Amino acid sequence: MDILYKIFIEPFVFMGEAPDLLIQTLWEGLVSGVLYALIALGFVLIFKASGVFNFAQGIMVVFAALTLVGLYEKGVPAFLALILAVLVMLVLAIVVERVVLRPLVNQPDIILFMATFGLTYFLIGFGELIFGGNPKEMITDALFLPQGTTELDMLGGMVRFQHLDIAAAIIASIMIGLLAVFFSKTRIGRALRAVADSHKAALSVGISLNQIWVIVWFAAGIVALVAGIMWGARSGVSFSLQIIALKALPVLILGGFTSIPGAIIGGLIIGVGEKIGEFYWGPLVGGGVETWLAYVIALLFLLYRPQGLFGEKIIERI
Amino acid sequence: MSFRKIGFGLAAATMLAGLALPALAQDSVYVPLFTYRTGPFAGSGTPIADGMHDYLRMLNERDGGIGGVKLVLEECETGYDTKKGVECYESVKGKNPVIVNPWSTGITLPLIPRASVDKIPILSMAYGLSASARGDIFPWVFNPPATYWDGLSMIVKYIGEKEGGLEKLKGKKIGFLHLDAAFGKEPIPLLQELAKDIGFEVALYPVAAQDMQNQSSQWLSARRDRPDYMIMWGWGSMNGAAVKEAVRSGYPIDKFYSVWWPGEDDARSGGAGAKGFKMLNWHGVGANFPALQDIQKHVVDKGLSKAPKDKVGELLYNRGVYNSLLIAEGIAQAQKVTGKKVVTGEDVRRGMENIKLDPARLKELGLEGFTDQLVLSCADHNGHRAAFMQEWDGTKWVKISNPIEPMTDRVKGQLEAAAKDYAEKNAGWPKRSEACDKAS
């Protein structure tokens, strides 16, 4: 009975007793969720356009952030370094399209997936060769990202809001909004959706697959740069950041591999879910549930919606 | 090409190899260095690798090696990955290494049973299996100058003294933030035992390797549990992220302690808010020692080091230097006790048991005042030396305590029980057959 009480009653009693901590946990979950969504967005963009699950998205986050910091350390002014980092991601997109994707056109998806594994390890090695393996500090001040904390007394306690987290949430939201407009309102965006629906049909109306792939990998690169700046500002830029990108996997399972709103909602559900789970139920098993809870949440959703929350339901005639 | 020509070629190659090998064997000993300059733990691994390499390279450049014998140095990149570390071991063991330093508790553990079989001593300097301090049970493993259990007992002792005595810790809560791996879990049994004996409460905060840079949950939990003190057993990017999160979450930073692994970069990452963060250490910081200046002159200035000039003398660089000091001393002592110039792994095992780094010897080595004295023996492969507490002042580490002796009375029993337990659980664990030298 005691264990049942600890599972089903005690956490909720504690939520009621310390609502400030509940708000704090929700806020931390939302911030993490937004950042997970940002990383997941990179996966979705590429998957939508090419059907490829880009395993290299995590290392792209690190590579983009290291490029920015590395250039700044070489004496390049922060905003010029930012522009140059964007250009580096464009060059990366062109190289990936030419060297990796184009020679593998018409190959099974698993081949392309494996190619992104290769790309991942190449970028790790190349990044370490250029920037070294040491962690670096994100150039938060030089980019005018806000620092500091606002402490609000509320609900009989205190809730801390990091200015950086607020900025991260706003910047990520703007980024997501811009991408949504880009995909729905621009010619390239519509072309991209056409490619996502059918490569052959898109080709038949004169859409260049190669061009679309460059654009989409470049967009994913920019998303990676923003995610790298935000994660880097929170906890430093190092190669271990790429592992966080694996958190995007349950987000994608949950939200669907082809849905931008799915990535956002999925990110928020996973972010909040894992923080709440770790905070209120983690102590029952000695902590550390955050590592696997995201996958459990995703799997539970899968039982009811195999295509994810917003994924496309595939109906095939037999 | 005819079979005859191939035969002649092979014979010539064999003769040349036969001529070359004894020449190599007469002039050098092989010292592999397991390092990690890549991956999530490179932030800690790189400066240590630099310090390790540079000290031994300096001996080669300045003195022509040790006792007239050149050191053949070769790094093997483990990425702090146990599997790769074991692969490194397998790749070097055929080259007759005189000692192996795995630089990871995870890699050390699978190598312990192999050491006695392959006759290669293992140096796990202040990491690895705490129980391997017992030379009678683990004759091939050395973990000086203090075990993780010693380290934990020093931190608990220090904060106990801050409170006015160990008994004042009764009713307090101590948080334990640790990497969720063999290394991070190593001191938990002792912490729980101390909690039971002294009467404080323990809250564990494991950090999975994939969440090293995503620790907001752990620090939220700390806010919920309100530990009076926080002790960290972290490595790689976990340390810097933890300092940042501690500052972010408003945890009183002066109550945040760590074992001896964070470096300057980790503390710096917390910005001004990191002032007051404390950690254990047992050696000097800075390049103001003759041996360090020789490294600068003979290695760094000649472009033979991978370390940036401004990193020479930083905390983790000097930790690597200390590690190589032990290797070099083990070889030097092996030469002394065996009378041989070119020593083997078996000789160096004996040499390690004869290490006596007293102030006079440290002065002779150009490291006067660098560290406390260390004496190893046949029975004691650790030394259980004291460490001191140092504090981050915003720009550098400042020593803030006298040497803190480990709580030997509380640790010893646990250590002996753990060593016996290890030997019992590993069926067929060999009884020590290696003779002890008189001096040790």
Image (tube, rainbow, N blue to C red):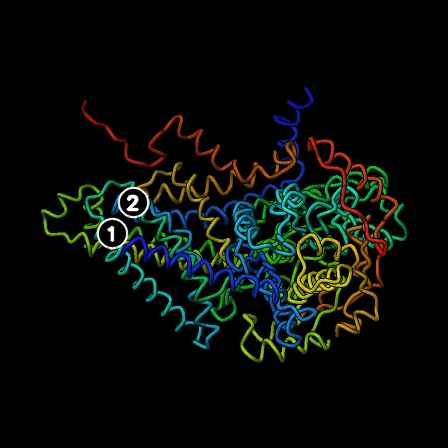
Looking at the image, which residue is at 54% across and 40% down? Answer: A291
Chain for numbered disc 2: A
Point out residue B46 in the picture as x, y percentages from the top left corner: 57, 62
**Which residue in the protein does label 2 denote?**
A52
Foreground residue, A22 or A313? A313
Q: Mark 2: few, some, or many residues within 10 Å (few <14, many ≥20)?
A: many
Foreground residue, B306 or B165? B306
Write down the quadrant of residue B398 in the picture. Answer: bottom right
| Cβ atoms under marks 2 and 1 closer than 8 Å | yes
Q: Is residue B263 above or below residue B93?
A: below
Asked if residue A20 can be seen in this view, the reply is no
Q: Is residue A205 left or right of residue A58?
A: left
Q: Nearer the viewer, mark 2 or mark 1?
A: 1
Asked if residue A15 can be seen in this view, the reply is yes
Q: Is residue A16 above or below residue A106?
A: above
**Which residue in the protein does label 1 denote?**
A101
Report the amino acid beneath label 2: Val
Q: Quadrant of the N terminus of chain B?
A: bottom left
Q: Is residue A72 left or right of residue B55?
A: left
Foreground residue, B326 or A101? B326
Q: Quadrant of the C terminus of chain B?
A: bottom right
Looking at the image, which residue is at 55% across and 57% down? Answer: B36
The answer to which of marks 2 and 1 sits earlier in the sequence is 2
Point out residue A290 in the picture as x, y percentages from the top left corner: 55, 39
Q: Secondary structure at mark 1?
A: helix
